[in-house]
Image: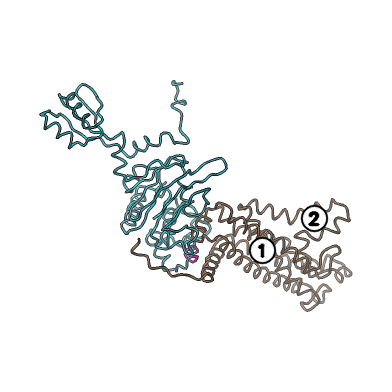
Chain colours: A brown, B cyan
Amino acid sequence: MSTTTAPRASYSPLSRFTDIVRSEFCKFRTVRSTRWAILAGVGFNIIAAVLLGIFLPRALGTHDQATIDSTRLSLGGTHISQVAFGLLGVLVITSEYGSGMIRATLSAVPQRRSMLAAKAMVLTVAALVIGLVSTFVAYFAFQLFLPSGSLMRTSLSDPGVLRAVAGAGLYLGVIALFGFGLGAILRFSAGAVAVLLGLLFVPPLILSLLPQSWQNTVGGYFPLEAGFSMISVQHVPNTLQPWAGFGVLCLYALVAVWAGFFLINHRDA
Amino acid sequence: MIEATGLSKRYGATVAVDNLSFSVPSGQVTGFLGPNGAGKSTTMRLILGLDAPTSGSVTVSGRAYRSYRRPLFEVGALLEAKAFNGGRSAYNHLLSLALSNGIGRARVDKVLEVVGLKAVAGKLAGGFSLGMSQRLGIAAALLGDPPVLMFDEPVNGLDPDGVLWIRNLLKSLAAEGRTVFLSSHLMTEMSLTADRLIIIGRGHLIAQTTVDDFLSEGAGSFVRVRSPQADSLAALLKAQNAVVARQGDDTLSITGATPDAIGEVARANGFALQELSTHQATLEERYMELTKDSVDFRTTGNALVPGRS
């Protein structure tokens, strides 16, 4: 055949997978949408914390300041930044389908599940690191802007505080993976984003129309409610325990990712 | 070498490719011809394992594409020009594909140079013209320096310079001993570039032949003879199994006999020849002749022309 092609070395499966991870990391860090999503995610967390640190003490009475879950409040930016993290997860996969890049990708890596695993790995590690850094920075920024001697001040060594701050970072990482799973299933950005936001924000609205007994039993199991139990220092009635709630959120993400893995080998690209 | 055996692909009720068997030999440019919707792109996706065949199989250098661990070293393919994320630079697009097959940065620089995109390597690919996008796609196909190359409509939308560049590139790739498989519906381009042809229509194989044979076999190719002794000449040629048609009092159009043979018959019998010419069909005529029954979206006459209802 070709006179110019060198004989091909056989490759171990591990080094093959390392190559695919490097490729996916290269894709992840070199596309504009990643930078925007990260900027938005980190920005929302920190800006919200700063604003809350400045204005909450003026808005709340002394009793409220002493009893309120101020750690959870300081992480309020996650309500918005989760959208950016979810979008990041969705786009990592759907942008390939949207642009046609997926056909170049799968021509280079016909082992589709390896490609998807490498993508999920790069995304999850990156989103967890960015999520954790942004929530810790947000927490310290909130403390920094509180007036001295504020009753809302907490310390990472207080019971549950470290878990809540780290939990917010973990929450954002898992939301990114959840978005990725939905993107892998639906393969187009608008659909996956709509389903993700729907699953996060619609259940509480529907739930509020249901009888109180229903709200108490199933209310804690929806993705956002389950995940946010990690972010609370004080346990909210009728929600899951922190790690149990986080486990439920992980389960949502894993089911979506598993479905994506199942489907990718059974569909035409 | 690409080999398809009984390849079929059905999308719901639509049969895109129907029991297709062909082989693409190495060291030649093989053209893949067919009207729009004939199944060319589908066939290429089946070759690359992007779509799974409903039945049948296709191998590249003896193995199914999906069994290759580093396929960029086996097959380079350009399917769509714009198959990249527009928010990524040309260099990073190629690097991300290269890394997945363990190919280094030096090779990325090299292919960018080969396709003439070195100066814009750092620019976002989203701003590329169609011609630049095609070049980027070809650069990706060359990353692994593969023995088999496959291009779907590579000259679509290119300016004359670009067309010439691709034509020469394809020929030089084939001259290096590589298998080049190229789809197009541009006949002139095919006749200039390809050595062999695989022609399909409505998913069926219509012909698999060399360009030369394809042109000389058709009804459009004949020898035209004008002679005062046309009747006698016709009788003698018919006796030699040639097919002879009258085109007027003294003119014959003959298929199944070479001009040499006809001239020899005339000389041996003392016939005068006033014309002896070969009429060769163009690739386009032959193609229309073969595919006239397999065009999906044919216009019906002149229904829209005023005055001819």
| A119 up-or-down from B299: above or below | below
Q: Residue at x 69, y 65 (%)?
A: A172
Give the numbered dot on residue B201: none
Left of A199 or right of it: where is B37? left
Q: Quadrant of residue A71?
A: bottom right
Dot 2 crowding, Cα within 10 Å, few <14, some 14–19, many 20+: some
The three-letter code of the residue at mark 2 reads Pro
| A54 up-or-down from B260: above or below | below
Which is more toward the observer, B197 or B152?
B197
Left of B278 or right of it: where is B182? right
Q: Quarter of the image containing the N terminus of chain A?
A: bottom left
Q: Judge whether residue B287 is colored magenta.
A: no
Q: Judge whether residue B98 is colored magenta.
A: yes
Q: Earlier in the sequence, mark 2 or mark 1?
A: 1
The three-letter code of the residue at mark 1 reads Gly
Please state the horizontal and vertical placement of residue B214, each as a whole percent of the image: 32, 41
Q: Which chain is disc 2 placed on?
A: A
Residue assigned mark 1: A41
Span colored in magenta: B96-100
Q: Residue at x 17, y 27 (%)?
A: B233
Q: Which chain is disc 1 placed on?
A: A
Seen as rendered, the residue at the extreme bottom is A157
Residue assigned mark 2: A204
Please state the horizontal and vertical placement of residue B37, each as a whole percent of the image: 47, 41
Question: What is the magenta segment's predominant secondary structure?
Answer: helix
Secondary structure type for disc 1: helix
Dot 1 crowding, Cα within 10 Å, few <14, some 14–19, many 20+: many
